[in-house]
Image (cartoon, helix red, strand yellow):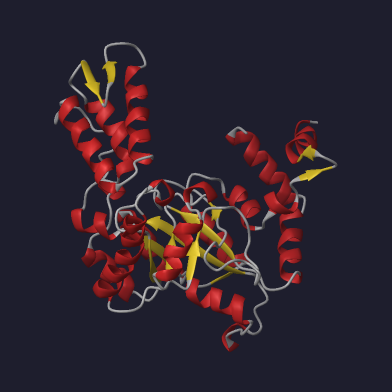
Amino acid sequence: MGRRILIMLAGFFYYSGLVALARWWTRRAGRRVAILTYHSSVGGNFLQHLLYLRRHYRIMPLDAALEELYSGHKDPKYKQDRRTPLIITLDDGYTDNYTYAMGLARDYCIPLTIYLVPGYIESHQRFWWFEGQSMAQRARATEFTLDKQTFQLEQEGARPILAQYIDDHARFATSVAEREGFLAEARAVLDLSPTIEDPVRDNELHPVNWEQALEMDKSGWITFGAHTMHHPILSYITDLAEVRYEVTECRQVLEQKLGHPVRSFAYPVGQAQHIGDAVVQAVKDAGYDWAVTTTYGINTPASDPHRLLRIEADVDQHWLVVAAEAAGLWDLLPAYAGYPLSVIILPMLVA
């Protein structure tokens, strides 16, 4: 669905009263917790999103909201607040979470939960998912073989194909060592230019450092969770011992650095195919109380605390889209009489 049509659809939901109705229905349905997930916080509409969400939801720290969900015990200070609890999470721990999001959290009294990747904090290298685009753009070699695949970069469209090839190999690696070995080979074979402008050079796309993380932790508005040591996609890792290391060591390092317990975990990428039962068991064995996926939905007391649902959001989205997503409308109104929702609504928008 195109961006413009999506905004029109979300606008219809909002101005027709469907968003308000969905929020009311969620409140009436019993205990619920919505969890939104972002990554970067700058360059878009993050503040608009926060102001809308603060007005219509009870934004809470993750641990407090989930304790209320599962125990049924509501903090006395929220006794008169009937709004649905909502958690805002940011995955990966980009530097802009420190330079921008922390200031918003403090200034507008909005708690945020950030999931950190200690291996990247310690190396302060760029995250692996930016490497394909960066290396393909900066490659000076015109013809080469990479992992048995030959590329001729002088051909039209070759660089985007190379970028995707690098990304796929990093994404589907069966170990962190395999991923990093492939990326090192690519850097050497491609003869990367230090002078060609790097399309992913923005320092705010790098991870925070430990000093920044500690300052955020002490702010009172930021809490942290674990996101593995090196951000592999866990279901693709063939050695279960490595899976356990990524999950367990991450928590131990964070607790040592921060000086307090870390109770929650976020699965990298986080869809069902990226997790699996063995990965969930490793998370349980590591002692985490909660773990979040990126599967869409709103959580209830019946939700598995180690497969919690989240609503993916992006700072580039219009606030109307976020309003519809947070209200759970994509779940509440998936179809009518077998027809996709877009088939029903879109004619109303263009009539």
Q: Quadrant of residue 307?
A: bottom right
Indicate the quadrant containing the N terminus: top left, top right, bottom left or bottom right: top right
Residue lying farthest to the top in this orientation: 155
Report whether 26 appears left or right of 322: right
Closer-to-camera residue (178/36) = 178
- With respect to residue 258, does 36 lie above or below? above
Closer-to-camera residue (110/292) = 292
Answer whether residue 181 is visible to the viewer in this image. yes
Q: Position of residue 255 (x, y in %)?
A: 30, 74
Q: Position of residue 151 (x, y in %)?
A: 28, 17
Q: Residue at x 62, y 66 (%)?
A: 303
Q: Residue at x 55, y 62 (%)?
A: 308
Indicate the quadrant containing the C terminus: top left, top right, bottom left or bottom right: top right
Q: Position of residue 295 (x, y in %)?
A: 57, 53
Report whether 199 appears left or right of 301: left
Report whether 13 appears left or right of 202: right
Closer-to-camera residue (62/8) = 62
Closer-to-camera residue (123/307) = 307
Q: Position of residue 180 (x, y in %)?
A: 24, 42
Q: Quadrant of residue 201?
A: top left
Answer whether residue 107 is visible to the viewer in this image. no
